Image: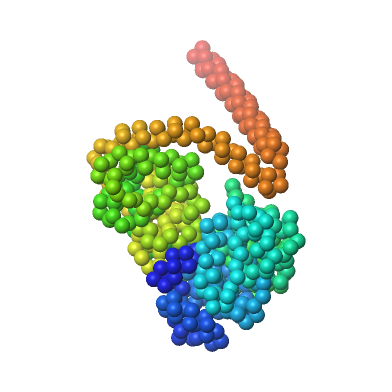
Amino acid sequence: MDQGLSNLACGASSAPVFLCLSLIRDSFRPEIPDWLIQQCKQMGITNPTPVQESCMPAILEGRDCMGCAKTGSGKTAAFVLPVLQKLSEDPYGIFCLVLTPTRELAYQIAEQFRVLGKPLGLRDCIVVGGMDMVTQALELSKKPHVVVATPGRLADHIRSSNTFSMKKIKFLILDEADRLLEQGCTDFTKDLEVILSAVPAKRQTLLFSATLTDTLQELKSIALNKPFFWESKSEVRTVDELDQRYILTPEKVKDAYLVHLIQKFQDEHEDWSIMIFTNTCKNCQILTMMLQTTFSNLAKFKSSVFKILIATDVAARGLDIPTVQVVINHNTPGLPKIYIHRVGRTARAGRHGVSITLVTQYDIHLVHSIEEQIQAKLKEYPAEESEVLKILTQVNVTRRECEIKLESTDFDERKEINKRKQMILEGKDPDLEQKRKAELERIRSEKRKFKERIQESIQRKQNVMLRKKLQKKNRVKRKKQR
């Protein structure tokens, strides 16, 4: 898509939108407006992807739709184009609401609406956390055509403001729908309930995701209007252009392998971009500090400019960063769908890419789960172990220095303060929440101790019975000997 739209305009699922004039007329609806045809032509758009070809006609017919296709397959354009066509027929605000799990994804989706809807004079509003709520409330009161939001911040506006109404929206779109209904560390359920109570029952609901999960079965209950369900026929959830590799390494050697891989790619391809995924914000910070220190100390790399992004799984969903050639998983993802989203940041829009997962001896079962899900085997990456061993001590020392330096900045304390601030914004009492968690932990601890006591009691009884049996056996044996 970067050949047509800008990197952000490609959107969360930025495989080419590709709807040439004849295909738009023939494959979808003959009454596609001229301005949209012209806009597609200017973007160099030629052919529809399967998710677009399958879902767009149903959306244009006024049906609810659920689309599930691999990452990078053009899911965003599958809902942006029909929404723009319907908006051109009856323009008003607020016409469309798009919900997405992350603020980064919200900005990308809004950018795609803005670029493709430019001839309409489309007005959009982004409602995400981390921005001034008063400014957002003013924008919402101006009735933009499209609102792109994260559930938490939009629910806050609905609870605290009456300056805007969502009772007339035509489209409710849930992008990365499975993540929106997950009940994990980020639970949107309560916020979704608030939002659904504020939108009309008579609407079109569109759900899109790269992974089909049990939560999507629950989301089907939201779609009531002649729902159309479409899932990619391909069992493989990763694209053919992606070369998927792994390196089996001890935990203590992972960082050295990471540095070695970056050195190798920098030597062979100076213009390549690398994306590194890790499991926590703290690890992100440590790896950033470690790599900066390591490469500034290596003379051959002092003048080099590295194009590296280190991120947690927040960046694994939908983000369209152009020309990422390599994705490195510093930790093996605990769930196959997280792996699918991570490696989906490369090999997008028909390009080729490489993914390398650093696997410890404790992660082999996770790799098997991933291979089972994607219906493909990961191949071993031919790393040069001797080169890794040369830098092992230096890398480990540098990492430890970075950990000490980070601890001195009260990183964990600031993280805890930010958590408390977020709870206050959500209308929760941090102290009560802490007491509640402590109480839950106490109950869990008591349950564990109770189970242990029961097991000890059972074990004691078994031991007594065993002793009695042995004693009886010995008595019988002695009688026979007499």
Residue 260 in picture, x, y percent from top left: 30, 44
Q: Is residue 177 visible?
A: no
Is 423 on the left or on the right of 4, as rendered?
right
Q: Is residue 141 above or below residue 422?
A: below
List the single residue furthest toward the right.
162
Is residue 452 placed above or below 482 in the rendered structure? below
* Quarter location, residue 2: bottom left
Quadrant location of residue 83? bottom right
Residue 60 locus on image (x, y percent)? 59, 79
Residue under the image location 58 percent in, 60 percent down:
100
The residue at 25%/51% (across/down) is 267
The quarter in which the N terminus is drawn is bottom left
Counting from the top left corner in percent of width and height, residue 393 is at 31, 33
Q: Nearer the viewer, residue 154 or 48?
A: 154
Q: Viewed as shown, does residue 327 lie left or right of 153? A: left
Q: Residue furthest top?
A: 482
Residue at 43% over, 60% down: 321
Residue 465 locus on image (x, y percent) = 60, 24
Whether residue 9 appears in this view of the structure is yes
Residue at screen point 32% across, 41% down? 296
